[in-house]
Image: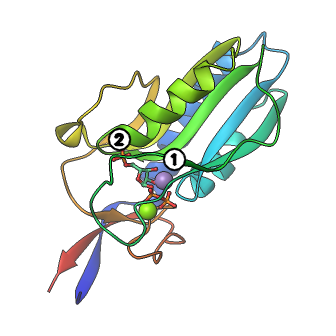
């Protein structure tokens, strides 16, 4: 598809918001022994890197891969785990870090599966939310930005696996 990309959320706005969320996360978990920050690959990699470096607490990083949309623009609705966490989370404070919530299927399913492992607590942080697209409800504790139903890329988010490394959130414009 021939397209161009336009800036929707500039880098400085993202980093400011990430810092605000990091400060709130730090405050909420100030008494934790260890906060396990879980990145859902691949989209969350940039947010996890920027967010975790601003949370001044004892933390562990771990990663999970839920089944991807692949190169399609639509959700498959069926979420499978392609790569599980490396470590157990029983009794731990857990924060799931995600780049975007669209239909909610990915986070809803991931959250349900992790809850079965009896973490001490489980919260969710996402950079972007598209509330108008939601099909299943997910309790989200930190939302960076709520956005309209635009096709967005950058800061971890791909279009056919490209653009994840853009430092800003861009909007794809078909030509
Ligand atoms: C995208 C995005 C979220 C999910 C959101 O991931 O990164 O994880 O879709 O959609 P949902 O709320 O409708 O489930 P994708 O499956 O494309 O994999 P990726 O992170 O590797 O790009
Ligand atoms: Mn993803
Ligand atoms: Mg994707």
Pair 2/1: label in front? 1
- Helix, strand or loop at label 1? It is loop
How packed mark 2 is, by other alpha carbons closer than 10 Å (few <14, some 14-19, many 20 or more), is some
Q: Look at 82% across and 22% down and name the residue there.
A: 34
- Helix, strand or loop at label 2? It is strand
Q: Which residue is mark 1?
A: 80
Foreground residue among 152 and 86:
86
User: What label sits on residue 145 in the rendered view?
Assistant: 2
Residue 18 x %, y %: 54, 41
Colour scheme of the rendered structure? rainbow
Foreground residue among 42 and 20:
42
Q: Are marks 2 and 1 in contact (CB under 8 Å)?
A: no
Q: The C terminus is located in which quarter?
A: bottom left
Residue 16 x %, y %: 50, 44
Q: The N terminus is located in which quarter?
A: bottom left
- In the image, is residue 30 above or below residue 1? above
Q: Look at 73% across and 41% down and name the residue there.
A: 85
Q: Residue furthest bottom?
A: 2
The answer to which of marks 2 and 1 sits earlier in the sequence is 1
Q: Quadrant of residue 117?
A: top right
Left of 91 or right of it: where is 71? left
How packed mark 1 is, by other alpha carbons closer than 10 Å (few <14, some 14-19, many 20 or more), is few
Residue 22 x %, y %: 61, 32
Left of 28 or right of it: where is 78? left
């Amino acid at each position: 598809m021939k397209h161009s990309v336009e800036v929707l959320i500039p880098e400085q706005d993202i980093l400011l918001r990430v810092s605000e969320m990091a400060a709130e996360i730090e405050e909420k978990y100030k008494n934790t022994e260890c906060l396990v920050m879980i990145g859902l690959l691949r989209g969350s990699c940039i947010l996890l890197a920027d967010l975790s470096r601003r949370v001044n607490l004892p933390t562990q990083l771990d990663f999970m891969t839920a089944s991807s949309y692949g190169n399609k623009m639509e959700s498959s609705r069926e979420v499978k785990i392609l790569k599980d966490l490396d470590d157990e989370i029983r009794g731990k404070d857990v924060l799931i870090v995600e780049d975007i919530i669209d239909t909610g299927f990915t986070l809803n399913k991931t959250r349900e599966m992790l809850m079965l492992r009896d973490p001490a607590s489980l919260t969710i942080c996402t950079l972007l939310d598209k509330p108008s697209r939601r099909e299943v409800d997910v309790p989200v504790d930190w939302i960076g930005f709520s956005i309209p139903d635009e096709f967005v890329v950058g800061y971890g988010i791909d279009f056919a696996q490209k653009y994840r490394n853009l430092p800003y959130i861009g909007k794809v414009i078909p030509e």
